[in-house]
Image (cartoon, helix red, strand yellow):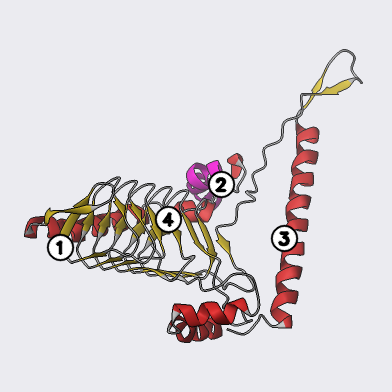
């Protein structure tokens, strides 16, 4: 992939400077408000002593999406079910419709050199062509420009949920997670392919270059060794993971049910994306409680 354009570098640098300046001004404003509002009177009529300094930084400095000039940008479908404010998407990460990325999850694709342009649509077209290049060819091309390369992108399919504290990376190659996949709490997936309607149990580890075929179940705590291929409809357990048995038709149907239920739960969290923990408590209370009353009284 070509290097980022000069305009992309300028926009990235200027945007970061403006964002940091705005956050600094916000903190100064909160500090001034604290001193102005929280002053108490002691002693004489004209003697004031400020209360112990209290400062609630309502502006979260956490960024959910991290675009990287040489490693691409996250792309989240407008119809995403839920993207937690404290989740982290770094580099070339794409999230499909009705998918959900839960609290504390980290999706990191920062080892692929598919530089950003000034157009998201152009980035998408370039990335699709770039993904078809064999891993070794990408790595050799990348090594001509930097000390590492060959990494891939992370693709999250429709109706897939990446639950709390999970980690997905694409250091060696692409990490592709299909549609309707459930990835349990604290699970790890590294440069692997997970087919549609699979379930990756809590705390499971899927190592590099693993291929899991559709409608398979990786049990909680299982560790799937590098390069393993898991056929469709099987239950794997243990460390190292091994086949325990085939899933029953009823168990395979529950894989679809699990994903659909998580879409419903995720949409119930959608207001968190709007609030994001970045508003003063008084404003949150107004929006959630007092707004209807105020609108009614104003109409009267």
Q: Name the residue under label 2.
A: 277
How far is disc 1 from disc 4 in space, using C-alphas? Answer: 33 Å
CB contact under 8 Å: marks 3 and 2: no
Residue located 47% across and 51% down the image? 272
Instruction: Indicate which disc, 1 or 2, sits on the residue closer to the N terminus.
Output: 1
The label on residue 270 is 4
Q: Residues within 10 Å of mark 4 (few under 14, many from 20)?
A: some
The answer to whether 100 appears left or right of 123 in the picture is: left
Q: Name the residue under label 3.
A: 19
Q: Which of the image's four quarters has the N terminus?
A: bottom right
Residue 120: x %, y % from top left: 55, 80
Front position in the image: 134 or 186: 134
The label on residue 233 is 1
Q: What element carries label 3?
A: helix
How far is disc 3 from disc 4 in space, using C-alphas? Answer: 25 Å
Q: What element carries label 2?
A: loop
Q: What element carries label 4?
A: helix
Q: Give the range drawn in magenta.
A: 284-299
Which mark is nearer the camera, 1 or 2?
A: 1
How far is disc 1 from disc 3 in space, using C-alphas? Answer: 48 Å
Magenta portion: prevailing SS class: helix
Which mark is nearer the camera, 3 or 4?
A: 3
The answer to whether 280 appears left or right of 172 in the picture is: right
């Amino acid at each position: 992939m070509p290097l980022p354009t000069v305009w992309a570098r300028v926009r990235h640098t200027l945007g970061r400077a403006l964002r940091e300046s705005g956050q600094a001004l916000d903190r100064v404003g909160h500090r001034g408000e604290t001193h102005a509002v929280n002053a108490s009177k002691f002693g004489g009529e004209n003697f004031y002593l400020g209360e112990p300094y209290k400062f609630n930084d309502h502006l979260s400095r956490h960024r959910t999406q991290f675009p990287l000039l040489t490693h691409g940008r996250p792309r989240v479908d407008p119809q995403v079910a839920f993207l937690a404010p404290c989740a982290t998407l770094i580099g070339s990460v794409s999230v499909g419709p009705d998918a959900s990325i839960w609290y504390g999850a980290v999706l990191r694709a920062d080892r692929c050199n598919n530089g950003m342009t000034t157009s998201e649509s152009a980035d998408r077209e370039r990335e699709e062509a770039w993904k078809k290049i064999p891993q070794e060819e990408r790595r050799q091309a990348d090594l001509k420009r930097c000390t590492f390369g060959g990494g891939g992108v992370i693709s999250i399919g429709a109706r897939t949920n990446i639950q709390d504290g999970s980690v997905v990376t694409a250091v060696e190659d692409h990490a592709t997670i299909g549609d309707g996949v459930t990835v349990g709490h604290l699970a790890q997936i590294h440069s692997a392919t997970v087919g549609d309607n699979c379930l990756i149990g809590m705390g499971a580890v899927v190592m590099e270059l693993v291929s899991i075929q559709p409608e398979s179940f990786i049990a909680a705590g299982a560790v799937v060794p590098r390069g393993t291929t898991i056929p469709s409809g099987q239950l794997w357990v243990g460390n190292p993971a091994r086949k325990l048995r085939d899933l029953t038709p009823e168990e395979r149907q529950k894989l679809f049910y699990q994903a659909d239920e998580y879409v419903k739960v995720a949409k119930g969290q959608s207001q968190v994306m709007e609030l994001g923990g970045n508003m003063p408590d008084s404003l949150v209370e107004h929006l959630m409680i007092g707004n209807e009353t105020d609108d009614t009284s104003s109409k009267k």
